Amino acid sequence: MNKGRLIVFEGTDGSGKATQSRLLFERLEREGVDCRRLNFPRYGEKSAALVELYLGGAFGSHPDDVNAYAASTFYAVDRYASYKQDWGGYYEAGGLLIADRYTTSNAVHQASKLPDGEREKFLDWLFGFEYGLLGLPEPSLVFYLDVPTEVTERLMRERERATHTAADIHEADDAYLRECRENARGVAARCGWQSVDCTRYGQMRGIEDIHEEVYARVKALLG
């Protein structure tokens, strides 16, 4: 039996990954497509404990206080546990999974900590570690939701006020977010991700408008 397919939504914080992954999942489900949805990291799970400590500032108040390789292993452990305990069998049996973040997030957020000349080496290590040594599935399709940093900063601050929640060490660092976006665009081109321009004239496109673009590309994959 053929192995499954994994569709990943990637982007910087506040770019709409959760919304777009949910809309795609719900639409495919309505159409009778057997699929499951994943979200990473899995806050509240034991396997995500180091991720939560890191993002909460327990190892330092700035993202650079934990190097890219160490931080990446925190997230990798959570994904590995999820695969082994939750969705690995479903995927191996041919299932379709839709993920909000994946290994690709380390390529976006952790590689941005490194000088330009060291990022290619890091990406080779990252993908070799997770897809090779750990045996996690490679994505069939990755959507990179591209949003200018000034727009995501505004959206995140609005979300914080509306939900009365504090930003984590990634979200609170505007300079880090700008570096992540610049790095993400290069990684998307290097890895052949599907880039989706989510803004027009400095404003976010409508959620449904973005969804229709994503859906059309997914239908081409599914046939």
Image (cartoon, helix red, strand yellow):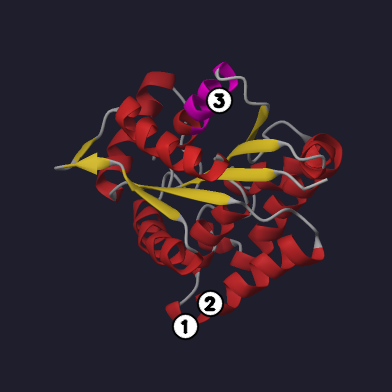
Residue type beneath disc 3:
Leu
- At horizontal 62% and vertical 20% (from top left) the residue drawn is 32
- Of 85 and 14, which appears nearest the observer? 85
**Mark 1 Cα within 10 Å, few/some/many (few <14, many 20+)?**
few
Q: CA distance from mark 3 to mark 2?
A: 35 Å
Q: Which residue is mark 2?
A: 120
Relative to 169, say whether 209 is above or below. above
Main secondary structure along the magenta-highlighted residues? helix
148 sits to left or right of 122: left
Identify the secondary structure beneath mark 3: helix
Eye-nearest disc, 2 or 1: 2
- The stretch of residues the image draws in magenta is 21-30
Q: How many marks?
A: 3
Which image quarter holds the C terminus? Answer: top right
Q: Are marks 2 and 1 in contact (CB under 8 Å)?
A: yes
Which residue is most to the top? 30
Residue 24 percent coordinates (x, y): 50, 29
Eye-nearest disc, 1 or 3: 3
- Of 185 and 24, which appears nearest the observer? 24
> Residue 117: which numbered mark, if any?
1
Identify the secondary structure beneath mark 2: helix
Which residue is most to the bottom? 117
